[in-house]
Image: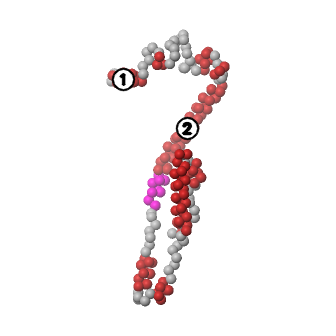
Amino acid sequence: MAARRIAQSSINWSALAERVPANQKSSFGAFKTKSDIYVRAVLANPECPPQIDWANYKKLVPVAGLVDSFQKQYDALKVPYPQDKVSSQVDAEIKASQSEIDAYKKASEQRIQNYQKEIAHLKSLLPYEQMTMEDYRDAFPDSALDPLNKPTFWPHTPEEQVGYKSKEQLEAEAQGHH
């Protein structure tokens, strides 16, 4: 039992507090306070129960065998410490989720590299206020106006163009052909 005694809380409260959203800080504070109260209550008690002076009670209690009976019952009493049945499940879930975490990190690193390339590309362009229509067309051929090859009507949005079909119309047509 002595090995199970805690000297202090094993929770890294500062690291946990960094992960708590701002709107839940008060609940987190209440939770930490309650936890601290429990830890203090455990630490206020001695690690082992005080020893009972059975010889003194045998002298004071006149009923023969009563103290011996109590001592035998007291010594036989063992309060079981709860078995840890879930740590292995938690460890298994951590291992299972670790591959997902690694895959997410790898995908995130790839996205970061792509975004950094995009940022570098945008920084290499002329500032928008200095661009001409031709410069914009060269930099962004997909979104630039091309009045000769792809004439459009003002305000040059897809919805205002001839032959435009909304998502709903396209879905209805796709269902109608099946």
Magenta-colored span: 84-92
Residue closest to the eye, 104 or 2: 2
Provide residue 110's location: percent of width, then percent of height. 56, 35
Tell me: residue 39, above or below residue 72.
Answer: above
| Amino acid found under the numbered disc labelled 1 | Ala
Q: CA distance from mark 1 to mark 2?
A: 36 Å
Q: Which mark is residue 116?
A: none
**Image point (42%, 24%), residue name:** 167
Judged from the image, the secondary structure of the residue bearing numbered disc 1 is: helix
Question: Disc 2 marks which residue?
Answer: 108
Question: Disc 1 marks which residue?
Answer: 172
Which image quadrant for residue 78?
bottom left
Asked if residue 104 is among those painted magenta in the image, a careful observer would answer no
Judged from the image, the secondary structure of the residue bearing numbered disc 2 is: helix
**Image point (45%, 64%), residue name:** 82
Location of the C terminus by quadrant is: top left
Colour style of the rendered protein structure = secondary structure
